[in-house]
Amino acid sequence: IRRGDRRVRRSGVRRMTAVSYSALDKADAYWQNRDDGKVWEAATSEQKSEAMLAASEYLDSKYLFVGRPETTTQVRQWPRCNAYDRYQRRVEGVPPQIEDAVAILALAYLNGTRFFGNISAGTTTGEVQM
């Protein structure tokens, strides 16, 4: 999990610690050499970090994952205990699929999507293959 120590202002709320599922350099690598990555490349580091935080918050608000958080004090749902992939291998840390989802959702955020205005009531349940 990527931890930051700068204050982040989003929707008028100030947070002392921003936590994203992915590091900025991983998201940069994801969008490198992809046609859709032009908007990502043009954004500042601050804009990208805000978008990645929004994407991480969205994933946590929309999905419930198998297993349980590793600690009772962690901000995000991952990393988790008792979580296994589709091949029944134990998942360690934050799965790469979650990191990729953050990169994809962060680009949508930079393109104007505001997730929390789009969330319908309730939580989505179902199986997510890793």
Image (cartoon, helix red, strand yellow):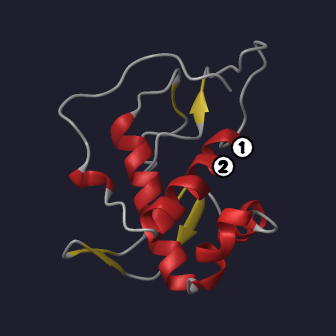
Q: What secondary structure is found at the residue carrying circle 1? A: helix
Examine the image and state in which quarter residue 37 appears.
bottom right
112 over 89 or under it: above or below: below
Locate residue 124, reporting x and y percent. Answer: 34, 25
Gap between marks 1 and 2 measured at Cα: 6 Å
User: Where is residue 72 drawn, in percent x and y?
Assistant: 42, 40
Tell me if mark 2 has few (under 14), some (14-19) or many (20+) residues whose alpha carbon lies within 10 angstroms of its own.
Answer: some
Q: Residue furthest right?
A: 33
The residue mark sitting in front, 1 or 2, is 2
Residue 75 vertical placement versus 38 (above, below): above
- Residue type highlighted by circle 2: Asp
Residue neighbourhood size for the residue with mark 1, other residues' Cα within 10 Å, grouped as few (<14), some (14–19), many (≥20): some
For the point 53% across and 21% down, the residue is: 67
Residue carrying label 1: 96
Is the N terminus in the top left, top right, bottom left or bottom right quadrant? Answer: bottom right
Question: In the image, what residue occupies the spot 66% across and 75% down?
Answer: 38
Residue annotated with mark 2: 100
* Residue 52 showing in the rendered view: yes
- Given residues 59 and 89, the one toward you in this image is 59
Residue type highlighted by circle 1: Pro
Asked whether disc 1 touches disc 2, contact meaning CB atoms under 8 Å apart, the reply is yes
Residue at figure coordinates x 47%, y 53% from the top left: 56
The x, y position of residue 117, in whole percent, is 22, 53
Is 7 or 106 nearer to us in this picture? 106
Residue drawn at x 45%, y 82% is: 6
